Amino acid sequence: MKHLVFYMALVLTLVFAPSAHATGNGAPSGSHYNLNIICVPNGKKADMTGTQGRTIFVACDGTSKINLIEGTDFLVLDRNGTDGSASFQLPPTDTGVITDQPGVNDECTLNLDGSFTCGTGTSVYSVFARALGNRLGTAVMMLCGLDDLGLPVCGLDNQLKLDASGRPAKFENVTANLLYIYNVTINGVFYKRIPLFSDVLQDYFWNYDNNGLKLLQLRFYHCTTVVPADWPGPIDDSACFAK
């Protein structure tokens, strides 16, 4: 079955990951993967494909594209988002996508109103974010994918609005914003929720529209978040803070 190797590896990680609880900055404690998205005023000219590091460079003003590549672990593949696009590898996100059969949208459930809800809504891991830098810095980030015609489909309703004005800066759970797309119509069919790497779409990416945000810190924790079936709705990330 599709993603079976990924699923087994991630389950083992979840089983043996150390317990977590809340910290003073709002994030869970425990092991995690750090990704820093840093803005630069001028575009980078060096080839940053395959270079080591946990940073991605984006424009301070304007839109950058971060391509999302499915893999077994978290890894920056191309750090330079100022030349058109960067690339970031991450594992499958939703437990329903992990067990999906290739070519069959069996991670999607038909609702009574004719719409579809895809994925179980339980993430394999969780994403926490905080914005840092100049207090006037803001950015908007959203998950997108391409339909069969190559047209972008983006999570406009659940886009992540970032603001560096808060002090002290706190981490917030953004799993539902960065790993799911809500409330979109594709080929005349309405989808209430689509998880990252669902085969409903392809060539997923984050659209990062920056307005002076200097630094976005993302942390990926091996704990589950239950996201809503409809947006807006509550999330349950108590597993990330269990002692």
Image (cartoon, rainbow, N blue to C red):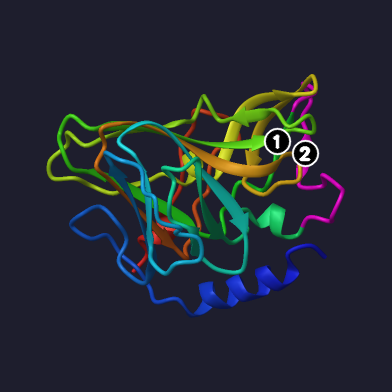
Task: Count every numbered label the image shows and give the total.
Answer: 2
Front position in the image: 139 or 27: 139
- What secondary structure is found at the residue carrying circle 1? strand
- What secondary structure is found at the residue carrying circle 2? strand
Q: CA distance from mark 1 to mark 2?
A: 5 Å
Q: Main secondary structure of the magenta part?
A: loop
Q: Position of residue 16 (x, y in %)?
A: 49, 80
- Which mark is on residue 60? none
Q: Position of residue 9 (x, y in %)?
A: 62, 75
Name the residue that disc number 1 marks: 117
Q: Is residue 146 magenta?
A: no
Judge whether 169 appears above or below 35 on screen: above
Which residue appears farthest toward the front when viewing the image?
A: 45
Q: Is residue 112 magenta?
A: yes
Task: Identify residue type, mark 2.
Answer: Thr
Name the residue that disc number 2 marks: 109
Q: Position of residue 164 (x, y in %)?
A: 21, 37
Q: Position of residue 149 (x, y in %)?
A: 78, 29
Judge whether 111 appears above or below 81 on screen: above
- Residue 210 visible (yes or no): yes
- Magenta segment range? 100-115
Front position in the image: 235 or 35: 35
- Which residue is pictured at 75% across the width and 39% down the height? 200
Which quarter of the figure has residue 146? top right
Contact (Cβ within 8 Å) of mark 1 with mark 2: yes
Judge whether 129 appears above or below 146 on screen: below
Front position in the image: 90 or 84: 84
